[in-house]
Image (cartoon, helix red, strand yellow):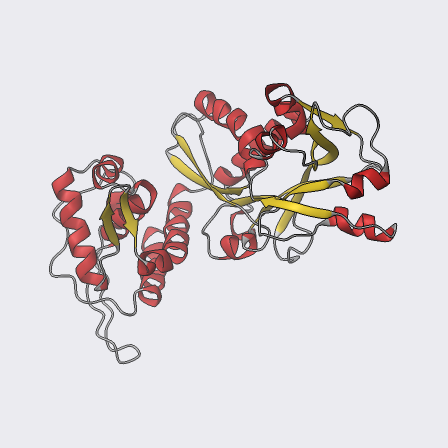
Amino acid sequence: MIAMVLVIFELRVFLWFRVARQVPRSLDFKIGEPYYLLKRIVWISNIHDMDLTRIDLNLLLVYEALMNERHVSRAGNRLHLSQSATSSALRRLRETLNDELFVRTSDGMIPTPRALELEGPLRGALRDVRAALEGGTFDPVTAVHAFTISASDYDVALHIPRLSQRLSIEAPGVDLRILPHTNVDAVAQLDTAFVDLALGWFPRAPSRLHKTLLLEEEFVCVMRRGHPLASSLVKLEAFASAPHLLVTLVGDTTGIIDDILAERGLERRVAMTIPHFAAAPYVLAHTDLIAALPKRISDRFASQYGLVAKPLPFESYRTRHEMLWHPRVDKHPAHQWLRKALTEVIQMDSK
């Protein structure tokens, strides 16, 4: 079983390292379970007129740790290596790929375009090997695992902290990597295994991906407490006439609210767009802008920033909040456990 997995992995590595050069020698360290199983050398030559000889698979683990930590010492700690051993591995990885891969800056090690290009395919390959070696069980108490989730700051503000609390109790060795989310790139992130799952609203997600509804979110009209519209119910014409703040993950200047107004022969002025829900309360507190925001965001921040929330002046507007994942991880026990835990956390928060 392990031999078959490693053969498949070696072929995937070949495809994604077609420009690699020869590695002078294998690494002189041994990484603990389960990584020692990857201490293999790939021998492939004369394919597509290329001379791809030896690639030590441990180098890929060093690459992965550096992508996660962006720091040599922390990457070494993750792999139980000294700083000098990690630096040596990085040097050999650079020789293999003929690229700096990580450039030292005041903010840590910044990946080069080549390193970013390799991230999705290599993470997918490593996940496949780990999934095969883990077998059909997942014990959260003893598991050492990292999940990558694509999510907006809506989830980071409302749900991820509760999930983190649950992990600290039930799965202390499980880490979370939260990446910025937009509906535009979520499918590509899942296809390339760049992320394990995505949270948001995915009306155009292809049917080949798995999707489940987590909750329906009601929107309300939010403004500062002293706003001219704050003293009474907001009328439709007043709502359309007021300058608006729009939270948009991709920079659009129109949204579903504009479609609703257009059906009634009205339009609004979007005076400002921002990419973060959590920043909206602060902006509203210091301007005369109004915004249609998720009620849960309003409930969380209204008292802190001196805001009031009013019903929207048309039929209640709701959006779907969904979880999206790739079929390749649908049956994986670790991923099933994560999806169940996240679903329970979000549904509990929505009560």
Whether residue 314 is visible: no
Q: Residue furthest right?
A: 264
Percent position (x, y) of residue 78? 27, 36
Q: Nearer the viewer, residue 309 or 242?
A: 242
Percent position (x, y) of residue 133? 37, 45
**Residue 7 found in image quarter:** bottom left
66 on left or right of 294:
left
Viewport quadrant of the C terminus:
top right
Q: Residue at x 55, y 30 (%)?
A: 157
Q: Residue furthest bottom?
A: 49
Seen in the picture, residue 341 relative to 75 is either above or below; the reply is above
198 on left or right of 8:
right
Q: Residue at x 21, y 39 (%)?
A: 76
Q: Residue at x 61, y 24 (%)?
A: 301
Q: Residue at x 78, y 30 (%)?
A: 229
**Residue 69 found in image quarter:** top left
Seen in the picture, residue 254 relative to 20 is either above or below; the reply is above
- Badge count: 0
Seen in the picture, residue 286 relative to 260 is either above or below; the reply is above
Percent position (x, y) of residue 258? 76, 50
Q: Nearer the viewer, residue 326 or 249?
A: 249
319 on left or right of 84:
right
Whether residue 325 is visible: yes
Percent position (x, y) of residue 165? 49, 22
Q: Nearer the viewer, residue 125 or 240?
A: 240
Q: Nearer the viewer, residue 42 or 171?
A: 171
